Each structure stands twice: as C-alpha cells, then as structure tokens.
Amino acid sequence: MAEIAAHQSRPAPQHWFGLAYLLIFVAGVGFFLLSFIALGVLPGLRLAETIASHRQTDMPDYTAAEHRGRLLYTSMGCALCHTQQVRFLPADVRRWGAPIAAWETRYDFPQLWGTRRIGPDLAREAVVRSDDWQLTHLYNPRRIVPDSVMPAFAWLFDGSPDRPKAGATDLLAYLRTLGRARQAGAGQTVGVRVDTAMDPAIMMEITNLCTAPFVNANQARVADSAPALGPAASTRDQLVARGSMLFAQNCAGCHGVHGDGNGSAATGLLPKAKNLGQYRFSTPGLARILWNGVAGAAMPAWRDFPTVDLASLAAYVQTLHITAADSAPSTAPLLARGAVVYAENCLSCHGAQGQGNGPVGITLLPRPVDFTAMQPDTARITKVLSEGIAGTNMAAWPKLTPPDNQAVTAFVRTLFEAPAGQRP
Amino acid sequence: MTEELDASKTGHSDGPPLSFVAGAPLALVETGLIRAHAFAALAGLIIAASFGTVAAIKLVQPDFLSGQVWSTWGSIRANHTQGIIFGWLSNAFLSFLYFAVPRLGGRPVTSRRLGWSLFALWNFGVVLLGWVLVSVNLPNYFWAIKPLEWTEFPLAVTCVTEFCLVLMALQFIPPLARKPNNDGIYVSSWYIIGGLVFTMLAFPVGSLVPLLVPGAIGAAFSGLWIHDAVGLYVTPLVLAIAYFVFPVRTGQPIYSHFLSMIGFWLLFFSYPLNGTHHYVYSAIPMDTQRAAIAASIITGFDVILVVLNLMMSLRGQASLVRRDLPLRFVWTGVVMYLVVSLQGSLQALMPVQRYVHFTDWVIGHSHLAMLGFATFVTLGGVAHLCQRTAGCRYHHGYLNLAYWLILGGLTIMFVDLTIAGLIQGQLWIDGAPWMESVRASQPYWLVRAASAVPILLGFVAFILGTTIRDENRRVDTNRHVPLLAAPTAQASHG
C-alpha cells in the first residue's frame, strides 16, 4: 500500500510550469515541430535542391487538358491502386525503368506516389500502350485484360470505347504525360541520383540497369529480335494445352475466345485485332510478333513472358488456323504474273521479299504485314484488296483486274517461309 | 440529461484512490452528448465497414455495383478509410471523452452548447459531407478526393475537420489541464491532451502542405500524416481508453507510474519520427528514411513497455478479464497493439520493405491496427460507458457474441492478407507478368471478402447489445468495483 501510495501525487503547490503545459507544449507542439522539421523541412530542402539542380532539363508543365485529366485521375482514386513511384530497387527498375527522381515530380501538386500496388506502376506509362488500347481499357478493362479487377469507367464515354467524352480524352492526355520528360531524354545527362546513404550493392545494380535505354516489357517496338522458340522439353500437346490457357488469359479479350478477332475489345480497337484463323504463322514469325508487339496498333509486346510460355502461345495460335479449304490454283504463269503485279503495286510497302520492309513501308506504323511470317488465306487477301484494313495504311485496291487480283493473291502466299517439314 | 454531482466522492486527502476509479463523476457529465456520439459512432462503424466490404467484393467481382462514379472502387475505398477514422473512431473518442474528461479532471467540459455544435459540425460537416462529396465526385480542386492517405476527404471537408479539431481541444483540454485538479493529471489525460494538441497541428500540415509543395517534397509531409493519423491521433486516444478502463474495471492501480511516463514520452517522441518509413527506397533522402526506420524500432520497444505496464496492471485478474466484456475487449485490443506494433517495427526494416511494401501484407497490418487494436479497445470503451451512463443500454450476451464474431473475422482477414502479400511480393521480385500477381491474389481476396461476414455480423451484434434491453435508469457505478478504497491508479500532479 505504501509503495502504491508513493506513486500517487499529492495536491502540490502550484508549479510555475505545470505538467499540463509540459504536455501541451512539449508532447503536443514540441515533438510535432521536431518531426515536422526533421522529416519534413530538412529532407524537403534537400529535395528542393535536387529539383532546382535539374532546372535546365526540359520538362513541360501540364497543359489545361492534362491538368483536368490529372484531377480526374486523383478524384476517381486511380492512385489508390496504381503507384507512380519506381523505387530504388532492382525489381522495380527492371519493370519500369530508372527510379523516380524528385525533379520528375516538379509539377505534381499533390504527389501520387501511392502506398499500394494492385495494378502496375504508371510512372512511365506514357508510351507503353496505344491510345485505342488505353481507351478500351478505361471503358472496360476486362474487355482487354480478362482477369483485370480494375473498375470500368464507362461513364466517361458515349456508349462505346471509340466515343470518349471529354473526361476520357483528358485522362488519356494525362496518361501520355507519365514519364514523358524521362522518355524525351531529360535527366540522362545527370544519371541516377547518387545517395551516399544507399546500400552500395543495390545502387551499383541499379546504375548498371540504367545504362541501357529502358523499354517497358509490354511496349510494342519496331524490331526484328526475338528469342528462338525452338524445340522445348515439353511435347507439342503440352505446349498447346498451356498455350490455350495463356491465350484465354491474355489474348482472348481482343482476339476472341476462338481467335477469330471478335473479342469483347473489338469495337474499340483500330486496327482491329487479327482473325488468327485466317493466317498460317511461322514459329519465328510469331516469336517476333509476341516479343515485339505491333507498334502502331493495340497489340502489346509480351517480353515479360518466359520463353516457354511464348512457345506455348505460338503453338496454340498455329492450331487456330482453319486449314481445310484453300485450294486456289497456283500455276507457274499465274505466279509470274502475280510477281509483276506485286512489284508494281505492293513492293514499295511490303518489300521485295514481302517482309514488310519496302522503302515506303519502313516509314509506316503499323508496319505492313510481313508475308514471310504469316500467310493469309486466299479469301482474306481478296477481302483486304477490295476493302483495305481500317486503321492502317493498307487501302482498298480497286484498280486491279480480277485476273491480276487472283495472280497477286497466289503470289503473296508463296512468300511465306513455311517451317521446315511443313513445306508442301 | 446530466448526472447529479456526487460531492461525497471528491475527497483526496490521504493518498486516496483517484476519484474517477470509484466510478462516480465529480462533475457534471453530458450524458446526452455521450449517447449522441456513441450512436453516431456505431452508425459510422457499420456504414464505413460496409464501404470496406463493397471494396473487398469489388476485388473479386469488379463489376459488382459498377457503372457510376459514386460506387467506383476509388470512391468506396476513400469513404471506407475516412469513415473509419472520422465516422467511427472519432465519434467514439468524443463519446468517451464526454464520459471520461469530467471524471478525470473533476470539472465539466468547457461548454454543452459547444458540444452540440461540435456534434452537428462533426457529423454533418465532416462525416456526412465528406461521404457525399466523395460520392458526387466533382473533379475540382476544392471538392474532389485528395489522393493523400488518411485525409482523402476533399479540401472543403478538411477545413471543417480542422475547425472541429480546434473545438475539441477547447472542449476537453481546459477541464483536464486547469488547476487545481485534486487528482493530479492521470495518464489518460496526458494522452488526451497530447493527442488533441498534436493532431490539431499535424492534420492541417499533412492535408495542405502536399498540395502546396512539389511532389517529392509533398510526399515527405504526406508520410508524416499517414503515420500521425494512426500514431498520434488514434493511438493516444485509444491508450487513454485502455488506461481508463483497466483500473476502473479491476479496481487495481496501474502497475508502474514510471513505465506510464516512459511509455508516454517515448511514444510522443518516436511515433512522429516514423512517418518516412512509408516511403522507403523512394527519392526522399536515404538518411531521412534510415532515421525513420530507427525511430520505428524505438517505437516497437516503447510499445513493449506500454503493453507490459498495462498487462501487469491486470495481474491476478484473469477470471475478471474472461467475465467482464468491456475489459475483455480492451485487453484483446492491447494484445493486438503489441502484435501490430512489433509487426510494424519489423516491416519498417529495409529487407522486409523490399519484399512486402505495396502488397496486401500492409493492408493486413493496417486492419490489425485499426480493427484489431483501435476498434477493439474503443468498442470496450463504448461498452463500458454504455453500461454506466443513464439512458444507455447494455446486453452482455450480444456483446459477447460480437466479441467472438469480430475476433474470428479479423483473424481470418489478417492471416489471409498477410499470406497474399507474401505471394504478391514474391511474384513481383520474380519479374512475373503483372497479371500473375492479380490472378494469384484472387482466392485470397475471396476469403478476405468472406471475412467481412463475421465482422459485419459482429458489429450488428454490438449495436444490438447497446440498443436492446432496458435503458439504464439509475447507474450502478460500483457494480464491478467491490473495493472502493482499493489501491488505484497513480497520477502525477500537474
């Protein structure tokens, strides 16, 4: 009892500085100011210094539309699931490029770094996807990415993804700014910020990663490189089975469950997704398309997929071709005539070997079809020659006479480099 | 509306027990305001928890309730977190303060009229206005959701909130701080005074500065408020409840005055310095990050001391803790305080951050803090005051049911989200395609959504337990305090 009583305070004479004031001014005000200065003002001054040291880098402020888009982005809570903060960690840098530097957030009031990542980081989203992909995805993400859990923002559209209202266009304009300055080359001269307090091993790894120019694994690009999807440990049946699952998860949104190009995203995309049943694909050709995407169209790249998954997808896509009924004649005189027609009409874009690399073709996006990688069915060629392909530079070609038409169709089909063992 | 003064219990001449422990108020208690805020709190709890449930369902069925801006995930989530802190916890704190402050300070709160103005302003000008503005979603600087954690409500609401925080300080600090105060200033009062003053300053800084300074600099200040909201607003008031309820329900003193002091001062010193641990590996200077991580570890040790002090105050009371529901709620919350704080210190470490940051692990952690620690203790506080306030109701059976339902639901959710977070973190480090982590999360998100069922039912049971059965007419304040002259909590004089 006595011990406990000793803890008790008696009504004491008035102190000049009582406990109440201590609580208010030390615990409440003092420790607040301490944290405010130590963790807010002091690092803030250093950050302001690094921002100021990048004044010379060319970084435009947001335009009015971009600013409206940003406000929409924040008010709809996009930042609750999408960070805009590539951390100083190799895993982040591999996926999204150089870590976010303070100067990149110069015009961000408030910051959108975020604390939870349900969807991917968007700090460098500007160039990763095409406009039609973004709009269709905003309209309803599950049309393009079947397993997505992102909300649909259909009220920003006038009934369909190809009719965005002002809100959707503003939002798209804002997405186009994300990482824009970095992609335009700003910050390259200065390199990655060196923070001496950073773990040197991590810092070294990041610096190494940042020496090469960064391209997002899903960003389509014009390139011929691709990994060899050669014979794998798995049998073809195993590849097709896995490919079928991967196709449903990743491709069916645009290309349709059966690969007929009528996926739920079809209405919003221009050019439309290909009807995979109308082509014969070579494995290296598919590897190139999957690895690099189709720049200028909504088809992203899939460089984040392991090679075996790409091989599985390629194997599955090849099974989609409806092989039965292509019995169009291809006699030698017909092909000779076709070659002449091709040279006159098609070569400047599609190239002498049909690789889509003619002198005009290499200036176009999307690039003209590479006939060595994919062989369209006769019916498909006939349809394209009469209608063109909307959303690309392939126009309708009405000036060909029917025999020329037939000849060039037969000729184009001979350009295909069938996989060894599959040649007729 | 108000209880009568009981002058016979004010004596404090011979090192006597603190008078609030005896249960009878020394001063006028605004029971009307206690009841009003308690009902507002429970309404806020069930509404905010329902928002959270909708957000959880949307991760499983994204098209559930979709198509309009008011029900989009971002709006629902903002309404969930802000509803929990402003609608539920703040109202419950206010209710508790109206109950406890006159007992702790021996004086009535500053003004009844101020109290009702604050009630109206808080519930209509902050909670309701916030929910409505978030739902209407005007993309306008002043009226739109702010993308700042724990202060998502629009700027317009932020202004009202800050005004209310000032009113709160005016309402509750003077009766506790003014002299002479026969009981001295008890631990609970320290936490109340410190928490209210700190929040009054930290909230506007965390809400406004990030809007005024460029991104990375703003993030440094956002980080402060993310932590201060939980660490310097919710935690002190929740600990005030724990330090109040333990000695009152057991009739035993707090174990050590020294530990109370160390715990308090270390908390107010180290918690505010934790903020930057929300932005580890960011562009904020690494020295600042390391300082915040060091502070986070100190905080963990501080919590060990605080919990030790509280637990030692319950020595020999195991059967009472089992029997006595308000005490059991608070005890459980205190246990989870230890768990969640040690988890917090652990996850602030850089190697752990590398792995779990941005994942559902952190969501599990925040639910353990806000639902496990804060809500359990606060529910205990509300149960305590419901039992002992005229015009309130208290039903043991329903509250017992509520306890087990909420505890079960929370356990499922916490374990589930923690595992989900580990899986997500591993897939991200492995460089798997992004959607792999979403697909891998689906079963866990389903379980998490399902865990809302027991939790919501538990809240309903709690509401039933405080609304059915007869009103307390004359409050038997000594029901659980067999020894009026028992040794009791200590206070230090101020």
Image (spheres, grey):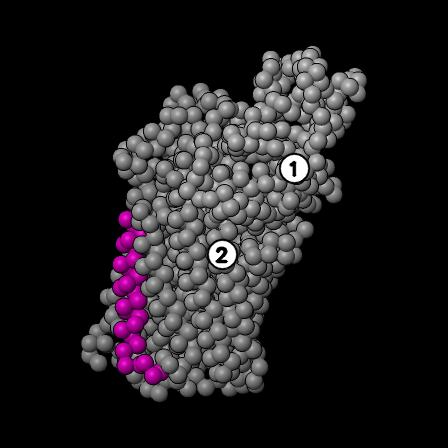
Label 1 element class: loop
At 41% across and 39% down in the image, what residue appears? A92
- Dot 2 falls on which chain? B
Q: Position of residue B343 (x, y in %)?
A: 34, 58
**For the magenta stretch, what is the residue range?**
B293-320
Q: Nearer the viewer, mark 2 or mark 1?
A: 1
Q: Quadrant of residue B41?
A: bottom right
The answer for which chain carries disc 1 is: A
Quarter of the rendering occupied by the N terminus of chain A:
bottom left
The percent coordinates of residue A374 (x first, y second) are: 60, 29
Find residue B165 and name its label.
2
Image height check: is A236 above or below B269? above
A126 is higher (above) or lower (below) than B370: above
Residue wearing tag 1: A323
- At label 2, the amino acid type is Leu
* Residue A404, image x, y percentages: 75, 18
Measure how far apart labels 2 and 1 are at the Cα level: 74 Å
| Count of residue discs | 2
Q: Secondary structure at mark 2?
A: helix
The residue sitting at 31% across, 54% down in the picture is: B346
Q: Position of residue B91 (x, y in %)?
A: 52, 65
When the figure is inspected, residue B96 is found, relative to residue A152, above or below; the finding is below
Is mark 2 in CB contact (under 8 Å) with mark 1?
A: no
User: Which residue is pictured at 34% across the width and 63% down the height?
Assistant: B339
